[in-house]
Structures are given as C-alpha cells and as structure tokens.
Amino acid sequence: MIRNLFTKHDMTAGKYTTESSASQAVIHWVMATMVFVVMWCFSQEYVAGKLNERTLNVQQQMDRINHHFNWPLSGTKDLVGDIDNDWQQVTSGFVSLHSEPVMSLAFDSRDFDPTLYQQLSVDVQLNGAGAKEATVRLEFSNQDQGKFYYAPPMNLSQLKNPLQLTDWQWFLLDEQGKAIGKPLQWTGLGGLNGLVLRFYLSAESTVEVRGVSLPQYQPRQWLMPKVINCQDAYKDWLSCAVTNRMNHLDEQHNNGISHQFMTFSVFNTVSPMLWLAVGWLVMLFLIWQVNPQAPLVVWVLVSSVFVLIFVLHQVITLTLAAHLRTAVMGLSLVLLLVYAGRIWRVEKAGWPLWLMIILVFLAVVYGLSLPLSFVQQLPAYFLWALIQQTLLGPVFSDELKTHLKTSDLTTAWLVAVLFAIIHAPNHSLMLATLLGGFIWSWSWLVYRNIYLNAFSHALLALLFYEVSPEAWLGSARIGLFF
C-alpha cells in the first residue's frame, strides 16, 4: 500500500516508473537525511556512554586510592617519541642502545595531581661496568601549558626503592633547557601529564627498564556535588552534543586534577546500538521504497556499511587491530584489481571541479597564512584516498545508480550518507564526509575521473585536518578508536 502511493509498476517493461519524480526524490532525500540524523544520535549516545562509564570508574578508583599510572613496558604503546635510536625491546622491557638514552612515557592525555601522587617506582637493571657512575634525571611536564620541571640527577642505585618525589627540589626549565627561578616543591607544581627519564651511563654499560609506576597516594577531595551534567556547566548545547567537543571537554574536566567530574546526557538508557538498528531499518526501507525488486548486491552493499559500523564499535576490534590492517590492505589490493577497468580509464577531465578545488585550497592557505608542510603527506594519502574513492564511485555510486534508477543527485546523496555514517562516532568527520561524499559521488557519475576524486580527497582532507581546531576535531579516528 505504501509503495503504491509513490510508484507505479509497468508490468510489460518490468520496471518501476515514477508518478511524481520531483516529490518522490524529495522523499528519498528526506529519508536518507533521517538515516544520517539517527546515526548522529547513535554517535552521541555511544560516546556519552563510554565517557560516562570511564568517569565513573576513575571516580571510584580515586575514592579507593586505586587510580594508579602504570607502564609495564610490554610494548611501544607505553612510550612516545622516536625510541628506535635509544632502546631495543626485549621480553622483559627495553634495553638501552647507547650511553645517554631517553625514555618518554605515554600519558594518553591524562593529567595527574602531584598532591595525590608522591611516589615513583622504576624497575631497572644496570648491566656492565660503571654502575657507580650511572645517573638518571627525572623530568615531569604539563604539555598543554608548555611547562617542564626537573630534579637534579640522582644515582641509578636510588631507583632500587620507590622514590619519594616530595623529598626532591624541582626546577622550571626555559626553552633552552636551563633552570629558571627558585626551587619548587613537588606538591606545588600543578597538573602534570608528562614524564621523561634521562639516563647517563658509561660506554661499557647498558640499562634495562622493566616497568614504571606512579601509584595514587591519597584520595581526592571532591567538590559537591561530585558530578555535574555538561548542560549545567555549558549553556551552549552544541558543546555537549558534538562528540569531538565532548571528548575535548572530558579531557579538560575529567582528569586527575579535577575536583568535580562532568557527565553527558544519554537519552537511550538501553544501548546506543538501538540507534544503529533504527538507522539500518530506515535505510533498508528507503531501498525497498525506491525499488522493491533491487538485486541482492544492493541490499548487501547497504547492509555491509551498518555491519562494519557495528564491528568497529566492538571491544574485540582492539584485539584484532593488527590483523584488520593486513586484511584492509589485502582487500584494497583486490578491489583495485577488480575495478581496474573502470578506475584507470578517464572519460572527462572535470575542469570545473579542478578549478573549485584549486580556488578553495589557495583561498584557505593564503587567507589563513598556513605553512605548506602538510602537503608533503599528499602522495601517501593519495593512495588511501584512491581506495576510498574506488569504493565510493565504481562500487557504491555505480551499483546504486544502475539498480535503483535514481538521478545523479539522489544517488550522490544516498552514497554521501553511507560514506558519512561509516565515520561514526566522529561528528566532525561525519559532517565533512557528508559534504565531500556528495561532491565526489556526483563527480564520479558525471566525469568518471578517479584521479580527480582521489587527488581532491587527499588534498582537501589534509587541509581540513590542518585548519580544524583541536577542540572541534581532536582526532580523525572512527569507531572504538575515537
């Protein structure tokens, strides 16, 4: 009955024809937009739930004096910076490669309050001659404020027992690495989120670092109420609804130096996956509405997007991350080979789009006086963009256009929505890829030029990352990795 309101079946031709093409196209656009809105809600609910759960866990741990910073050094994830020149990974930790190795520990945007963390334990083993002369210098920092503090070098033997950080005097470093001002007390340094260990060894010795820990010393003294809602703290509702901004606010408020934590509103208390299921059903209904006899390939392509979104938001994805990269590379190669005939052949140059890309790029770069160093990443990003554009153009755009018989603009909008929601729960990327996906899908259907799409994708994506404020992007990751 619903289908008959919009379509009329021509039994002789075996096709559905449109009674009112303009009104029906509007309905298709509205329904596709509904899918995007539903997936926007899914993203907000998913991120809010994840942040709220983490906040509650941290609060409970701090109340039990059990919120510790531990670096077991079982892999490079515990370290930041270029470690290959200084360290070699072994079964039990990392072994130095020269006489002055530097180890920088990863805090993952977590701050800590020195009044709550007053001891440092470093599990080290010195090998070779020169044990008495070996020293280590500790440097703590607040990376966000650009403040760096150090304690005078100490003998490596002092690391056999936990260090009482309050027993040492700390000095603020200037940009040249020189001490400035008077000595400072540990509890007066303010919030910190960086730790560097600088070792000074003899030429004949090496040091093996097996683990570092910074245990909580005493419970947090909370303001009342302990937890406030984001909407109460920020009257700007957008700050509490855009997932990128939510992540930024969570880092600011819900860290180790906060005396009052912040939570985010969740409307669906059951599961954010309900939003995903609703979005999937609306999209399937839209496909059925356009062409109930659409072949299996259409249903599979559309459903694969939602299945992939579901998989990317499961914890097991973290465990399989390394294998997923290999799988993606293999599938990408197969994809390029299968669609080689459509990819390499250019039908039209697409000069209007070339001109638009160049004008936008020049206007942003010169208008904001941006350095061009980010353009160096263009060749590598072009390959990744080529894979995405192959999926977006020859696969999704052509298949939907062929089997749904929709106009170029309607097809482009359907593909744009699918392309955007795969970037959930990253709201900023979802908006950017909604616009980009629409332009690239339409461009493929009109010009059939994969090089135009891949180049513009790579260039404009790098430009987008360069100009986006940290508070409104923060990360280009998607799924559970966001």
Image: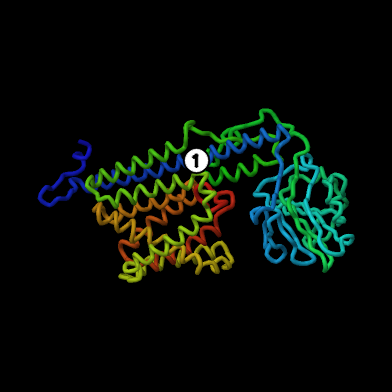
Residue 345 can be seen, yes or no? yes
Task: State the residue in front, 270 or 143.
Answer: 270
Model colouring: rainbow
Q: Among all residues in the image, which is located at the extreme right?
A: 132
Left/right of residue 275 with respect to residue 129 in the rendered view:
left
Residue at image position (34%, 51%) is 301
Task: State the residue in front, 169 or 428.
Answer: 169
Residue 481 can be seen, yes or no? no
Q: Among all residues in the image, which is located at the extreme top?
A: 225
Residue at image position (23%, 45%) is 292
**Total count of labels:** 1
Name the residue type under label 1.
Gln
Residue at image position (34%, 65%) is 339
Left/right of residue 273 with respect to residue 62 in the rendered view:
left
Reading the image, the residue beneath label 1 is 44
Left/right of residue 332 with respect to residue 75 in the rendered view:
left
Q: Note whether 7 is above or below 130 in the view shown.
A: above
Task: State the residue in front, 397 or 120.
Answer: 120
The spot of residue 107 in percent (x, y) is 68, 49
The spot of residue 173 in percent (x, y) is 80, 57
The spot of residue 398 in percent (x, y) is 30, 58
Task: State the residue in front, 168 or 319.
Answer: 319
The spot of residue 353 in percent (x, y) is 38, 65
Q: Note whether 415 is above or below 34 in the view shown.
A: below
Q: Note whether 94 is above or below 263 in the view shown.
A: below
**Can you say which quadrant of the picture contains the N terminus?**
top left
